[in-house]
Image (tube, grey):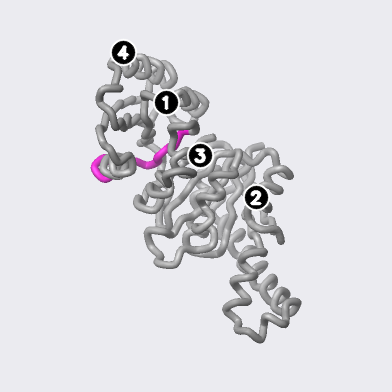
Amino acid sequence: MKTILVPVDFSEASSGAVDYAVHWAKHYGYSQIILFKVHYESFMDYISTLGIGYSFMGKDASTQYRKASSKLLKNLQKKAVSQLTGQDNIQIRTATSDLPLMRAIMEILLQHPDIQLITVGSDHTRSSEPGFITTSIVKIARISPVKVLIVPEGYRYTPIKKILVPCDLQHMKHLGKLEQYSSMISEHSALTVLNIYKDPAQQNDQMIQEWKDKLHSYFKGNALHLFHSYDHDTLHGVLDFVANNPTDLIVALPGTHSFLYYMANKSLSEGIYKNTSQALLLLK
């Protein structure tokens, strides 16, 4: 059984992530989606909006908050279930935790080893005050041992026909991990690998041809395109390419020279999901 975990905060971005997860589950063989609500930080934010008097009424405020939260979570579950048909063998479950978000996520991952994907909604491009989950995306991506899918608010699922993988071929030893996802890249999908480099002297024609041959062996029958971009600013290189070459999904590879590395050190992935309206999948 394959499961998708969707941390929610009842924002529009969070609701959109749930919708996207339902479609993803249908297309890629997932049998369960867990809508996950963490009360810890959310309750602290909640009582801060009620006024100083409520700070001395912790139990009453907590009860009031949990009732409201439970109702919203059930409504979100009903909405997700309504998108399923009799042919969809997918369960939509809910779960809650009183732990801080990162600890809560690690705990539920231990409890459910079948979780293979975390899907989160991002409202950076639409809101001046990002929601609780949006502000936690970088932390979630750092600690997660499973893939993380970031869905911008307002982004609607469409069959994935164009996939973009930006990387630096000179240092990319993890490009072979794409072979594990050949089933996701169907015969109807086109795969574009964008080689962004900062030093032209390091570009090796033989190395580039070797990677091209490997990719063709991984994805036989798929349309494969290899583009090269010389740019001192890696983020600019990615955003410029996406602006001129529409894609359905951006895939970030793991490894020292991947987006995930820059997310922890130079905020490249953060820059991408904050500045594009494309879904971003972070592999592990």
Q: Is residue 55 above or below residue 175?
A: below
What's the distance in space between the residues labelled 1 and 3, CA to CA?
A: 29 Å
Amino acid of disc 3:
His
Q: Of residues 256 and 51, which is closer to you in this image?
A: 256
Q: Is residue 63 above or below residue 266?
A: below
Question: Residue beneath label 4, please?
Answer: 206
Residue 246 seen: no
* Residue at position x 24%, y 42% in the image: 244
User: Where does residue 276 sit, x and y in percent of width and height?
Assistant: 35, 50
The quadrant of the picture occupied by the C terminus is top right
**Residue range highlighted in magenta:** 243-253
Q: Earlier in the sequence, mark 2 or mark 1?
A: 2
The residue carrying mark 1 is 172
Which mark is in front, 3 or 4?
A: 4
- Identify the amino acid type marked 2: Ile
Q: Secondary structure at mark 3?
A: helix
Q: Is residue 130 left or right of residue 191?
A: right
Residue that badge 2 annotates: 105
* Cβ atoms under marks 3 and 4 closer than 8 Å: no
Where is residue 55? Give x, y as percent. Answer: 68, 80
Q: What residue appears at the point 46 percent right and 63 percent down from the top-left corner? A: 130
Task: Give the tally of numbered discs.
Answer: 4
Residue underneath mark 3: 27
Name the spot of residue 239 as percent of width and height, x first.
30, 44
